[in-house]
Image: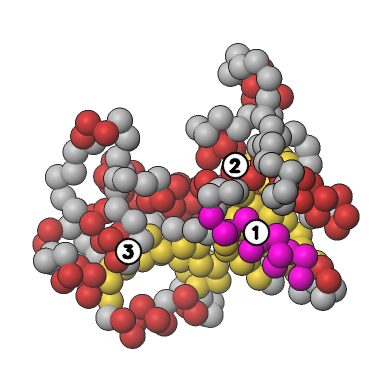
Amino acid sequence: MRYAILLLGAPYSCQASHSALRFARALVDRGHRLETVFFYHDGVHNAARLAAPPQDEPHLVDAWVALSTEHGTALQVCIAAALRRGLLDAREAARHGKQGHSVEAPFELTGLGQLVDLGLSCDRLVTFGP
Amino acid sequence: MSAPFPSDLLVILRHGSHGTNWLREGLDAALVAAAFGRGVSLLFMGEGVTALLRDQQVGPLGQKGTSATLEMLAMYDIETLLVEEAALERFGLTAADLMLPVRLLSAEAIAAQPGAHRLVLTF
């Protein structure tokens, strides 16, 4: 089946990101296709390029990148939710006159319309939140 | 038209206007879907029923509030507003306390809603 994940929880604040990652791995292990992980609400913090967790904790941001690299899963981040929380890619940083950027590929800033299309086009959209 | 679903999207709102951003970002998803031509129903449950209270002020919290957004729902053709009747009662409210016309649903009727929509998003 074609799956998508909606992640609403911040990393390291609640279980949602860990559970979503394990679910994502289980899906692809079973031969399903995980089209996209969509990050919304506090879930956008999962896209923070500068996240530097202690070495004895799972690195959630790197884990999303690895999932995307290995399985071609798109990592889409709601642009409105991201910008108000300080998560900007290089283009948005330049547009808003900010030094440095906090989001980079394979994460991509996109609109909420993508979430709705995704939910209606995939066989399953599974939400993880706090 | 004999669509199996009366509406594409059901957005379930379970938080009030202030204290968290859940309601605002849930409504944003509903408005965007409607702007893209999707049929949207809103279901207010639990504390979410207080989002519809009349005469809300933006207040001193530095938040925009959501009543202005709710007033725009009709412009976006979002007219199916469903409310958990038991939650209203728990808060000592009636439909007359709410700013928009709503349909009150029993627990049984609520249980039927997710199956009547192609996509459900919960905030």
Residue A75 in sight? no
In the image shown, does B61 or B57 lie closer to the viewer? B61
Q: Is residue B76 left or right of residue A79?
A: left
Q: Are marks 1 and 3 in contact (CB under 8 Å)?
A: no
Name the secondary structure under disc 3. strand
- Amino acid type indicated by mark 3: Phe
Tag nearer the camera, 3 or 2: 2
Q: Which mark is residue A45?
A: 2
Question: Residue B24 location in percent, x, y?
Answer: 39, 46
Measured in 3D between alpha carbons, the distance from the residue under mark 1 to the one under mark 2, in whole angstroms, is 13 Å
- Amino acid type indicated by mark 2: His
Q: Residue at x 52, y 46 (%)?
A: A42
Residue A20 on the magenta segment: yes
In the image shown, does B76 or B31 lie closer to the viewer? B31
Q: Residue at x 22, y 61 (%)?
A: B101
Question: Residue B47 location in percent, x, y?
Answer: 28, 61
Q: Which mark is residue B44?
A: 3
Label 2, residues with CA under 10 Å away: few <14, some 14-19, many ≥20: many
Residue B70 in sight? yes
List the residue tagged with mark 1. A18
Q: Residue at x 47, y 75 (%)?
A: B114
Q: Report the magenta residues as a range.
A: A14-27
Magenta: main secondary structure: helix
| B119 shown above or below A75 | below
The image quarter containing residue A67 is bottom right
